[in-house]
Image (tube, helix red, strand yellow):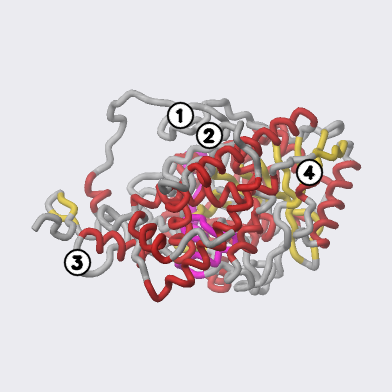
Amino acid sequence: MNDLVNEKTLVELSTLAALPFEPEKSKATLDALNEVLALVGQMQSLDISDVAPLAHPLERHQTLRADAVTETIDASALSQNAPLYEAGLYFVPKVIE
Amino acid sequence: MNLNFATLTDLQKALRNRDVSATELTQHYLTRIDALDPALNSFISIQAETALDGARRADERLARGDARPLTGIPIAQKDIFCLQGQRTTAGSKMLGNFIAPYTATCSEKLADAGAITLGKTNMDEFAMGSSNENSYFGAVHNPWDPKLIPGGSSGGSAAAVAAGLCAASTGTDTGGSIRQPAAMCGLTGLKPTYGRISRWGMIAFASSLDQAGPMTRTAHDAAILLEHMAGHDPRDSTSLNEPVPSFSEGIGKDIRGLRIGVCREFFTEGLDPAVERSIREALAVYESLGATLVDISLPHTPYSVSAYYVIAPAECSANLARLDGIRYGHRCLDPENLQDLYQRSRGEGFGEEVKKRILVGTFALSAGYFDAFYNRAQKIRRLIKEDFVKAFEQVDVIAGPTAPTPAFPLGEKASNPVEMYLQDIFTISASLAGVPAMSIPVEFANGLPVGLQLIGNYLQEGSLLQAAHQFQQETHWHTLTPPEAL
């Protein structure tokens, strides 16, 4: 199989995945991705046109629950993990100039 | 009694008879961790103070005569389970300073049953790996030979039990991450039916595959731990609402008439001949116990690795999207803008294997490739499930090797990802089908542990544990311990 991912697709994939595109590592990354995709490509040889996809191994529907608050977690327990948090706000770089 | 390698049942008895106190036992393991873990690196963090506090409360309970089933038993937990107020890293720099705001359901259930957590064990980053070489906190060494890998991703949990640093441990298994390290460290490890144990509070890798399970010295111990981990949890929408039987009560029955399917696709050319000999020897033991061996086929097994390496990365790319350096997790220094913050934080926070799988998953889910990859993999997943459904019309249990080789040297497969992925070739199909499966030690190969994999029908963990326990009544492989001088 020809390589499925080239440098242009790698740039697009990196953007979609919110990962940095690192030109100096691009050859190694491309080789690694194409090696995995070649392994994965083995499944292309099966005729599966009549088979329905399986999302849940036991084919059960996910249970739904009432849209009601069942528990709360103290905000300070959550905010202590934030890299930059002040006065109840998570700080990010300026978005609107 | 040798406390180092005592079983849960031995320890339950010793604690109740006051032969040892929970505090002495906890201190004993903590001392061993101090002495031996620098050579193994099986723990990421040790909670000595919390553990000793728990042990003091356990001793009070024991003195009052109202001990719970696991009161005073020191265990270790894979560092993928959130424990409130404690650092939970998933083996990643990304979560290197993450303090869990709540406790995983199955960890809470173990604590309610009286278990004491000594610490959190090392693992492949976000459970992605088969050798435990992908941890930000360094590789784990196999207690049987520190030059070898312990298996992965629950490699720390396996090494800690095998080295006698705790009585038992918890692990998680997405494609073989409990069974393969159990095989390589000479332990009993069980991946239950998908949904048997709640995933609440267990950091997600691939949500339709992830399952927690016990890693122990014996099948009896696995039954005890499973009883206290399993059960319906309304907080996990994929948790099964099924009764949890008393697994430890049912395992004493003999297995005469048990039909064991020997799957021909599990005896392929990649299987180490020494491992195959050990597996055939184990099957002969089963015949001597009155089981019948039935030749069976799971014809789509050869496609399982391909389907898995689409489904698992696709789910991981979605699950790990939440790690963006804003609400928690690693944040890069001086981001220029929001996009730079996301990309650099994730680029610095994730290791190479994790980034690769995110990219593979992003590719498989992207427009133009979804049908050819993700949808196709989900279809193959159905064929693999149907193979098992058909097989279980003929047999009660399926047996074969857990892994194609015994433990291999650190670094040996690090540069060959496909060879590493094939480590899970025998374990992945049970994960995709969602059926329960376990690994138990059988005859060693070249002085190293080998695992026999037993796969059961949906919710039939009891039959697996019974088959495993009966084997362990006849053999001594599970009682062997690594050389003391590590």
Q: Which residue, as the protein is rendered here, is positioned at the far bottom?
A: A24
Host chain of mark 3: B
Mark 3 or 4 closer to N-term?
4
Q: Main secondary structure of the magenta part?
A: loop
Q: How many angstroms separate mark 1 from mark 3 (CA)?
A: 41 Å
Residue B24 location, quadrant? bottom right
The residue located at (27%, 66%) in the rendering is: B332
Report which residue position mark 1 lands on.
Answer: A62
* Left or right relative to B205: residue B307: right
Q: Pinpoint residue B48: horizontal percent, then vertical percent.
A: 45, 60
- Label 4: few (<14), some or many (≥20) within 10 Å? some
* Left or right relative to B73: residue B342: left
The residue located at (47%, 61%) in the rendering is: A5
Residue type of the residue flagged with mark 1 = Gln
SS class, disc 1: loop
Tell me whether marks 2 and 4 sit on the same chain.
Answer: no
Host chain of mark 2: A
Residue B259 location, quadrant? top right
Residue type of the residue flagged with mark 2 = His
SS class, disc 4: strand
Q: Pinpoint residue B424: horizontal percent, then vertical percent.
A: 64, 54
Q: Pinpoint residue A54: horizontal percent, then vertical percent.
A: 55, 34
Q: How many angstroms separate mark 3 from mark 4 (CA)?
A: 56 Å
- Label disc, if present, on residue B336 of the rendered structure: 3
Mark 1 or 2 closer to N-term?
2
